[in-house]
Amino acid sequence: MTRLVDVLQQGEAWLRKHGVDRPRFEVELMLAALLGVRRLDLYLSFDRPMSEEELVTLRAWFKRRGAREPLAWILGNVGFHQIELDIHPGVLVPRPDTEVLVEAAIRAIGPAEPSGPPVFVADVGCGSGAVGLAIAAALPQVRLYATDIDPTALALTKHNAEKLGLTSRVAVLAGPLLSPIPEARPIDWVVSNPPYIPTRDIDALMPEVSRWEPRLALDGGRDGLDVYHQLLPVVRRRARHGCLVELGYDQGDALLDLFARSGFIDVRVHLDLEGHRRVVEGRIPGPSRAP
């Protein structure tokens, strides 16, 4: 008979052998997901016998994780900000650092006003929909355009919007940057977590990223800034209020300069929990700003 505690110990040893950080924690997450319980409940069930069906599933999960496939892909979901998203292979796994972008956008947009107008937000390169859907879930006045060039990402964003009950306020649109959004449609704010890893650095990243995650969502060109050079002039022309983007830890000076040269004002940075510059925010000046 194989007990839960046996699986916990053996799985931890397997993942540690294959270089996984926090192997005990990850095995607990797998067991809790498989059994439909909280992690803490596992410690009340150490002697629980595991069925052969459960063991088959866990062996497959351990093998995938030992190959350094992202855990979120294996479990099929990930918590992000105050929502839970479905996630699967082929789409970038949302990172906790990206929650800084969500929080900064929520503060910039501000709380809903009684009988106030809707606020139109474009999430460029939406991926799983994490950033835009988290903002829409937090702010009922938001109407979201989610754009991407990857059909896999667009399908997942649409699925997550349905799962979260946000479809009446979300349009999922195929195409680069803001081009899928008709010119006549208003855009108040643009948010984006674009590809910003320099091409030469991708292969040196942790295996979960370099081996598995889609290059399209990672590769920012020679210096990591390709998408920003394309995006900011378009945002400056079309948005009524401002733009917030995530960036790499060492790209702050370059992004601040690019925002300024693109004509944004009140440009500022937002730090992540480690004190790195994680988000740059800029406002649209003067006549371009909606009254």
Image (cartoon, helix red, strand yellow):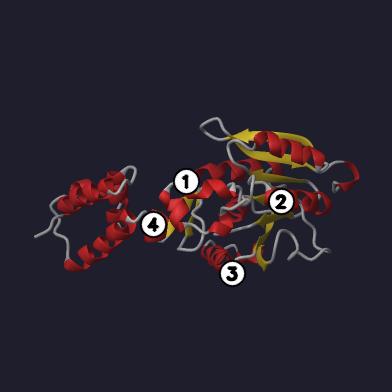
Q: CA distance from mark 2 to mark 3?
A: 21 Å
Residue furthest to the top:
275
Viewer-nearest of discs 4 and 2 = 4
Q: Note whether 215 is above or below 241 in the view shown.
A: below
Number of the label disc, if any, that sits on residue 151: 3
Residue drawn where x is 74% and y is 55% of the image? 118
Are the two marked residues, 4 and 2, in contact with CB atoms closer than 8 angstroms?
no
Q: Note whether 260 is above or below 29 in the view shown.
A: above
What secondary structure is marked by label 2?
strand
Residue designated by label 1 = 204
Residue designated by label 4 = 69
Query: Can residue 239 be seen by looking at this rendering?
Result: no
Number of the label disc, if any, that sits on residue 190: 2
For badge 4, the amino acid type reads Glu
Chain-order first, disc 2 or disc 3:
3
Number of the label disc, if any, that sits on residue 182: none
For badge 2, the amino acid type reads Val
Query: Can residue 155 be seen by looking at this rendering?
Result: yes
What secondary structure is marked by label 4?
loop
Circle 3 residues within 10 Å: few <14, some 14–19, many ≥20: few
Chain-order first, disc 4 or disc 2:
4
Circle 4 residues within 10 Å: few <14, some 14–19, many ≥20: many
Depth order, front residue of 163/223 = 223
Circle 1 residues within 10 Å: few <14, some 14–19, many ≥20: few
> Residue 49's spot in the image, x, y percent?
13, 59
Q: CA distance from mark 1 to mark 3?
A: 27 Å
Position of the N terminus, as image quadrant, is bottom left
Residue drawn where x is 56% and y is 47% of the image? 200
Chain-order first, disc 1 or disc 4:
4
